[in-house]
Amino acid sequence: MKYRYETFGGIIASEDPPFLAFVDREYMRERGLAASPLWSGPEEIKILTAPTEVHLSVTNRCPASCGHCYMGAGEADPGELGTEAFKEALGRLAKLGVFHVAMGGGEALVREDLFELAAHAREVGLVPNLTTSGHLMTPRIAEQMTVFGQVNVSVDAVGGHSGYRDPSHFAKADEAITALLGAGVPTGINCVVGNRNFEGLPALFEYAMKKGVNELELLRLKPAGRGGPVYAKEKTTYEQNKRLVPLLEDLGHSCDVVPKIDCSFVPMLAYHRPDKEALYGMATFGCEAGNVLLGGRSDGKISGCSFLEDTSLTVFDLEKAWTSSEELTLLRQVAQKIAEPCAGCDYLDICKGGCHAVSKYVTGDLSAPDPDCPFVVEFERRGALL
């Protein structure tokens, strides 16, 4: 089990079973760990000493050309890092104290050195995970995937109902999942959820149960890359956003598949008023761009998350710029400037005002409340009636 100190206590991470938890100082002491100089002040969550996870696009090249791709993947980024430069970047992240690197693309398997990079991540103390379309997967390649802690294959809908991808995608993804499970690789599914495929979620959970994957992670469709022009038409509706969490609870139990949501769906979770202490313990937060999470492009450029514009920083600047960067500081302070109804919401310290990539795209204001949060929709409807 790995750990690192923070002002509130620390963060512990395990790969078997996989989890990451924020714990208080008392828990750290009970584990036999000495007090940290970080504990000299109040026991509160501030800026972390480093992100817990960095989402790294190892390449922007991709053969799939999905119409909703938030990276706008297809052609290579100018200045894509070579093998040695990428290894250096991984070493820098490990030195900072990052726990996980989520490798993706584009299509990561386009890189011939992918497994060399993943092995190096292991060597420096990072847990590499992978997201893939499955297009280039073979049984032989699947056998090499054991270097990753988790491999998730992108599937938006079952069968010919391809969701937001080419109709031929499902068959390729299904073959990839079969190969990965056959090789003993921890395998899950990533599903981009919008209004087009929302009603197909029960069928997707049934499929996930029959295949035997270990998780099904739902990712909210974002207005980034090629997803921007289609967002207004394809986003989940108010009614769907209200139904999401109860639906996942039912499907998770009936299909015995672990459902997960990304941070942009946390407003929909908060709408049902879950236990806040449990959310803290499981490190379940809304937008933590520039703090818990960072995004990185294949040329080394850093963003608060993969759905926000790049900052002026690269991964090689982070050690010096982590606490001093004005751009990252702006992202961390977004929730402090947010308007009603978020300003008075009991879940603001967890939700952070929702997805600020959505806020920026829809309203032009990074610090505006997430316009698709059910609380926000209902607040605006009440205002319109006055």
Image (spheres, rainbow, N blue to C red):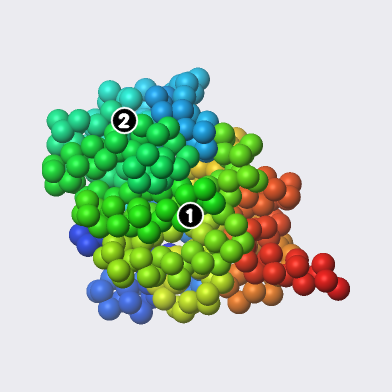
Residue 205, quarter of picture: bottom left
Amino acid type of the residue tagged 1 in the rendering? Phe
For the image shown, how many numbered marks are present on the structure? 2
Q: Secondary structure at mark 1?
A: helix
Residue 165, quarter of picture: top left
Place of residue 84 in the rendered image (x, y in percent of width and height, measured from the top left): 33, 25
Amino acid type of the residue tagged 2 in the rendering? His
Taking the image as shown, residue 263 lies to the left or right of residue 367, namely: left
Whether residue 186 appears in this view of the structure is yes
Residue drawn at x 47%, y 40% is 164
Discs 2, 1 touching: Cβ within 8 Å: no
Residue 338, quarter of picture: bottom right
Residue lying farthest to the front in this orientation: 160
Q: Is residue 24 above or below residue 56?
A: below
Q: Nearer the viewer, residue 333 or 242?
A: 242
Whether residue 125 appears in this view of the structure is no
For marks 2 and 1, give the one nearer the viewer. Answer: 1
Q: Secondary structure at mark 2?
A: loop
Residue drawn at x 19%, y 42% is 178
Taking the image as shown, residue 110 lies to the left or right of residue 311, namely: left
What is the crowding at mark 1: few (fewer than 14 residues within 10 Å), some, or many (at least 20)?
many
Q: Earlier in the sequence, mark 2 or mark 1?
A: 2
Tell me the quadrant of the picture where the N terminus can be found.
bottom left
What is the crowding at mark 2: few (fewer than 14 residues within 10 Å), some, or many (at least 20)?
many
Q: Nearer the viewer, residue 198 or 133?
A: 198
Q: Nearer the viewer, residue 142 or 235?
A: 235
Q: Which residue is mark 1?
A: 198
Residue drawn at x 83%, y 71% is 385
Residue drawn at x 55%, y 67% is 242
Q: Is residue 328 above or below residue 279?
A: above
Place of residue 202 in the rendered image (x, y in percent of width and height, measured from the top left): 38, 59
Q: Which residue is mark 2?
A: 135
